[in-house]
């Protein structure tokens, strides 16, 4: 569960806070768990929702100006072979909170833009836009890492 929190947090301390809050909720609401279903999936849902709550509480909606976005060409995929999982995690952490949240929910958790929009109280088009911008920023970070 710490891995989930690390993907949503800017710093490890924030991830620890999210994890702590999440497990407090798990123990508080364990009575709502339905036996016969996956306990791990239920806990994961509680943790992800705790990360979303943390985001809502601590970050204002902020996006970069569309004029600042530079189109990126598809880089050489061999860059991924030369980078560790920890380096990728750092790149995801370096995304703005809004971009990181949408990226994680869409790419890693598998939510649809409609669901993300409802969870984060944004429009579907904002969710899509934030995902595109997050991907562009990650591509740029990978390109810069690979070139150095």
Image (tube, rainbow, N blue to C red):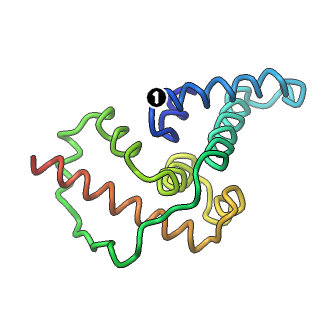
Residue at 68% x, 38% y is 50
Percent from the top left, x then y, of residue 113? 61, 64
Residue 119: image quadrant is bottom right
Percent from the top left, x then y, of residue 67? 35, 78
Residue 64 vertical placement versus 49 (above, below): below
Residue at 44% x, 53% y is 96
Tag 1's secondary structure?
helix
Residue at 64% x, 41% y is 54
Residue 42: image quadrant is top right
Which residue is label 1 attached to?
Answer: 12
Percent from the top left, x then y, of residue 124? 62, 71
Residue 22 vertical placement versus 143 (above, below): above
Taking 62 as reference, is 144 left or right?
Answer: left
Residue at 65% x, 66% y is 122
Percent from the top left, x then y, of residue 112? 62, 61
Taking 127 as reference, is 86 left or right?
Answer: left
* Quadrant for the N terminus in the image: top right
Taking 101 as reference, is 26 left or right?
Answer: right
């Amino acid at each position: 569960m710490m891995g989930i929190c690390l993907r949503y947090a800017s710093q490890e301390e924030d991830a620890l806070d999210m994890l702590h809050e999440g497990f407090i909720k798990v123990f508080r609401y364990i009575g709502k768990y339905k036996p016969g279903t996956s306990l791990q999936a239920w806990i994961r849902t509680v943790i992800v929702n705790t990360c979303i709550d943390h985001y809502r509480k601590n970050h204002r909606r902020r996006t970069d100006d569309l004029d600042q976005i530079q189109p990126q060409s598809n880089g050489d995929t061999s860059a991924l072979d030369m980078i560790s999982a920890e380096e990728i995690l750092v790149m995801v952490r370096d995304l703005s909170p809004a971009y990181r949240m949408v990226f994680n929910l869409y790419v890693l958790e598998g939510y649809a833009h409609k669901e993300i929009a409802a969870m984060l109280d944004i429009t579907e088009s904002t969710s899509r836009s934030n995902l595109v911008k997050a991907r562009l920023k990650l591509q740029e970070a990978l390109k810069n890492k690979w070139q150095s």
